[in-house]
Image: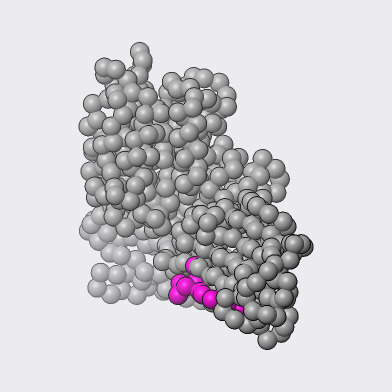
Amino acid sequence: MWRKVCLFFSVGLLMAIVSADGQCRKETSISGMALEGFVFKKFSVTAIHECDISCEREIRCQSYNYVIGEKHCELNNRTKEARPENFQPDPARFYRVRLVDRAPLGSSPEVSAVSCREIKASEGKNVISKKYWLDLNGSGQAVLVYCDMEIEEKAVDLAFVIGASGAQASSVFARMVTILKNFVDEYAVSEDQTRVALVDYNGPAIAKVFFNDDYNKANFTSFVGSIPGPGGQPGTLSGAFTKVRDEVFTTQKGERPFAENILVVLTQGNFDENSSEIRNEITNFRSNAVKIIVFAITEEVGIDKWKKISSGINLIVIPEPSKDTEEAKKLPHAASKEFRSCAEVKTFGYFSDGHYLLHVSDGCKDPTRIYCHNMAYNTPQEFITLESGTENNFAIVYAQRLQYPSGGCSGAVQSTLYKDRGTTYFSKVRLDITTMKILSNVFTFAQTQEGKDISYGKAGDCYSSSNSSECRKGQFKVDLRGTRLHVRDDVTWKVFVYPTSLTMQDYQKSRDGAVVFAKCGGWCGTCEPSGGFIILEPLCSIPA
């Protein structure tokens, strides 16, 4: 097949138009520049367009350099976008990117990348999060690895605990430092994106770096490399966990309420995973949605020990010495995977009931803290933990009834209590994660002190038919403060009451929609959300 070749020259640029179908297309070449270090094939040509033809026949070819005086083509397996630091002045060459049928970096084993960051640099801002082919340790063996292409934009509070002991402590600690440096290299360490902290338990546990210390990646990894390492009386992992809880994951030390909390544990396994100290600390971390990653430098067989402290099976790594770098670069992307339901969380390898960060809205990047219940079963359920407490989340249908209901708001009461009475307090409420509706009649985490279970957001009585402000005895309160959720603006409450002229009393809805309160009742009467559901929205500080 013949190709039509058109050449145009301008200052500093050579624009070649090469086409197999007789049509001209424009490609921009950069004169006096070359990509160094990524040439995989070099050959002589009689005309420049032969470089284009050869490049398009090679799946690995991403770009090429042309050696002007020698008429040589140098095919590159990278572009200048992927490796800007290797794009250097060279007056004897010009550079051109392959524009036709270029295989995106990481799309196959033949065009594997060395990191997720390299793929993003090569393919641009529109690249999506998914699995790509990576050769992480330069062995020539590519593997499929999940890449979170937004990891550097996310707000993450990333803490490490590190310590080694025993006869091999020095070599083990050196491996831990290498793992830590490669792990943190996948993040953008700054005040606005990823903040870092560190607890050293080579001796008695000491918190040495805090989130508000304003480290960047370079000075943090430099500091880690300067830690003296093992020596003297070793510390304990439980002691390190206590330091993390009391001194690291605190707002006073720079923890951010909207950031994801990740704790990376580098350990030899010299701890009792069944001790009350370890169990209590892990329970605390899970309650606060801290994601725990474990790098175990050990020869122990099996993962049962590590499952007791990690957040999920996929967050446990027992690396071979030759794969420390590879595993350290893979795991940040696995850990940052976003979930939209507890079922997704379970599918990815998490197995414990507890709090997880879910993305519940397409319009908001803020994650929401959701409690995943029944993670041991096939259909885990989402619940909202009501941080304001049971005393602020209740539903009451009043028990007593006046003997003369039309006579006012006080007087003798009947000896028989109202048959539909009930007082229910809620510590968690069930959430339909798809519709963002509270399933008000689920009482898994509710306590009814008297009578029937009363749905969340419902109240009533059968006390008096008077419309006086003192007559309504039934009441409800919805208090979502601390959950980063609020009642949607269009959600209202409706009364079902006799006489029909009666209304809710003391109806209050906070400006941010987090708190709703009212008194309801009649002879007899109730109030509940219009349409039967309380619909929620996240409080959004990071719009999508």
> In this picture, is 292 found above or below 146?
above
| Residue 155, visible in the rendered structure | yes
Q: How is the image coloured?
A: one colour
Residue 487 position, x and y percent, is: 54, 70
Please identify the quarter of the rendering in which residue 223 is found.
top left
Please identify the quarter of the rendering in which residue 458 is found.
bottom right
Q: Which residues are magenta?
A: 503-514
Residue in the image at 55% along x and 39% along y: 312
Residue 2 included in the magenta stretch of the image: no
Residue 99 position, x and y percent, is: 46, 65
Residue 89 position, x and y percent, is: 23, 57
Residue in the image at 39% along x and 34% along y: 241
Residue sitting at the far bottom: 501
Of 315 and 31, the residue lying toward us: 315
Residue sitting at the far top: 167
Please identify the quarter of the rendering in which residue 461 is found.
bottom right
Taking the image as shown, residue 376 lies to the left or right of residue 132, namely right
Residue in the image at 64% along x and 57% along y: 424
Taking the image as shown, residue 314 lies to the left or right of residue 162, namely right
Residue in the image at 37% along x and 49% along y: 157
Of 405 and 349, the residue lying toward us: 405
Residue 233 position, x and y percent, is: 29, 17
